[in-house]
Amino acid sequence: MISRLSHRRSNGKCLYLQIELKDDKHVVFTSSIYLQDMIGQVPRSDFPFKTTIVKVNDHFEFT
C-alpha cells in the first residue's frame, strides 16, 4: 500500500533498504535525497551496517 507519493525534492533515484522492525525484516523503497546522500558517504567496505532512521523536522536521517 502506498500512503503518499511525492516528487518533491526528488532526484529521480530510488534507494532500496532492508530494515528490521520488531524482529521482522522489510524492504523499503525511498527517493529521499537526505538518506541517499548520507548512505553515499558510507564506504562500500562498511556494508552491511546497522543504523537507526529518525525523523528530523520534515525528513528522515540515519543516526
Image (tube, rainbow, N blue to C red):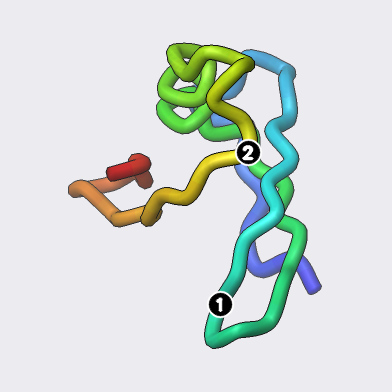
Residue 10 image offset from top left, x and y in percent: 59, 23
- Indicate the secondary structure of the residue bearing disc 1: strand
Disc 1 designates what residue?
21
Question: Which-is-in-front pick, marks 1 and 2?
Answer: 2
Q: Residue at x 47, y 19 (%)?
A: 42
Tally of numbered discs: 2
Residue 11 image offset from top left, x and y in percent: 63, 14
Query: Mark 2 packing: few (<14 Cα in 10 Å), some, or many (20+)?
Result: few
Q: Residue at x 80, y 74 (%)?
A: 1
Disc 2 designates what residue?
48
Residue placed most toward the observer, 39 or 34: 39
Quadrant where the C terminus sits is top left
Asked if the residues shown at circle 1 and circle 2 are in contact, with their CB atoms under 8 angstroms apart, the answer is no
Q: Quadrant of residue 54?
A: bottom left
Residue placed most toward the observer, 27 or 12: 27
Q: Quadrant of residue 28?
A: bottom right
Residue 47 drawn above or below residue 30: above
- Indicate the secondary structure of the residue bearing disc 2: loop
Residue 48 image offset from top left, x and y in percent: 63, 38
The amino acid type found where label 1 is placed reads Leu
Q: Residue at x 72, y 72 (%)?
A: 25
The amino acid type found where label 2 is placed reads Pro
